[in-house]
Amino acid sequence: MGKRTAATAGAAAKKTKVDPAFVGIQDTLKKADHLPASCRAMLAAMVPASLTTPSENRSKEQATVIQWIEEVLQKHQGQLSTEVDTVSTKLSQLEATKAERLSEVEKAEATLEAKKQVVPLKKTALTEAEATKDATKKLLDEKLAEKQVCDADFIAMQKEQEGLASAFVEHFKIPLEAGEKLHYDELKPFLRNLNLQESFMVSLPASCSKTKEERGSFDEIVIQTLEQELLDRAAQIKDVVSGPNPEREARDAAIQKTEEQLAGDVAAQEKATEELAAAEKDVELATTALDEIKESVAATEVDVKASAKLHDKLRFALEGFEQGPLTNLKSFKEATTAAELCATAGA
């Protein structure tokens, strides 16, 4: 009883044992999504019986099954080939894009380098513009100082002219015509430049402090003399202030020219400052552009590697399928009894 059970188990094991060459074919059939599940299962189940039968002994039904199996495998091969071609095309496009972007990187690097070289030139131009402006400013200060020294007397006369005209009217003419006392203290600052004798200078305070009724003949002479001297001094000042002065005019012309030059130098400095800022901004923008292109290249490189890996995987799957299930199917399809006998004899 025990021996029979063991023999039965051995026979069952032999029946359930599947040729490894069929496994790949059956797996492909089971994954054929374009077929109903029942058809896939039927074809997979019929693989061993159909393929192990020599070609000359196959029934019409078995030949038909093999044809169906072959069509499914060929369709699967076509799908794999299409996937390989699709990924290959995408990989080629990505590699072309990468090459273009690498070229853009080179151009961006050249552009950045060119813009970097501009910055030192603009800095030098700004330094020179600042030096020129400072030199012109110093020259203007020197000319203004020279004018102040050389025109000190002229300026003093201008101030004296203004003060004397007002003082003569308010402190001499008005009180004199009103018969009042003259305002000696207000007139005193202008007396030092008058051509008066010492005796008149001594008498002036007393004569000016008297009203018209209090003045004597000598006081009248003193007052008249003072009036004439004030008028003479005013006329003298007017001649000097209003008359031509070539040296002063030359100094003023030189100052005006230097002021115009300084204005031009200031404008040149401002322009140089703006140009330097623009050059530095160009470098900043070019650097940002280069970084963005490099990031794009890095992203493309990631895509290229992923596509290349997928391409290798799909190509390996296609080659494995063609050399495995597809080749096995062809071998079994064309197998004959004579071939089996030769194979057995060779073994």
Image (cartoon, rainbow, N blue to C red):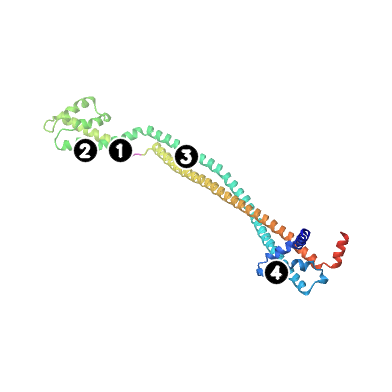
Q: Secondary structure at mark 1?
A: helix
Q: Which residue is mark 1?
A: 238
Q: Position of residue 311 (x, y in %)?
A: 68, 57
Measured in 3D between alpha carbons, the distance from the residue under mark 3 to the one under mark 4, in whole angstroms, is 99 Å
C-alpha distance separating marks 1 and 4: 133 Å
Measured from the top left, where is residue 127 in percent x and y? 51, 39
Mark 2 lies on residue: 169
Tell me the SS state at disc 2: helix
In space, the residues marked 2 and 1 are separated at their CA atoms by 16 Å
Residue placed farthest to the left in the image?
213
> Which residue is at 49% across, 39% downward?
130
Location of the C terminus by quadrant is bottom right
Q: Examine the image and state in which quarter residue 193 appears.
A: top left
The tag earlier along the polypeptide, 3 or 4, is: 4
Label 3: which residue? 133
Q: Do callouts 3 and 4 mark residues in contact (Cβ within 8 Å)?
A: no
Real-space Cα distance between discs 1 and 3?
39 Å
Task: Judge whether residue 34 can be spotted in this image.
Answer: no
Range of the magenta residues? Answer: 236-243
Q: What is the number of the mark on residue 42? A: 4
In the rendered image, the vertical position of residue 320 relative to residue 236, given as above or below: below
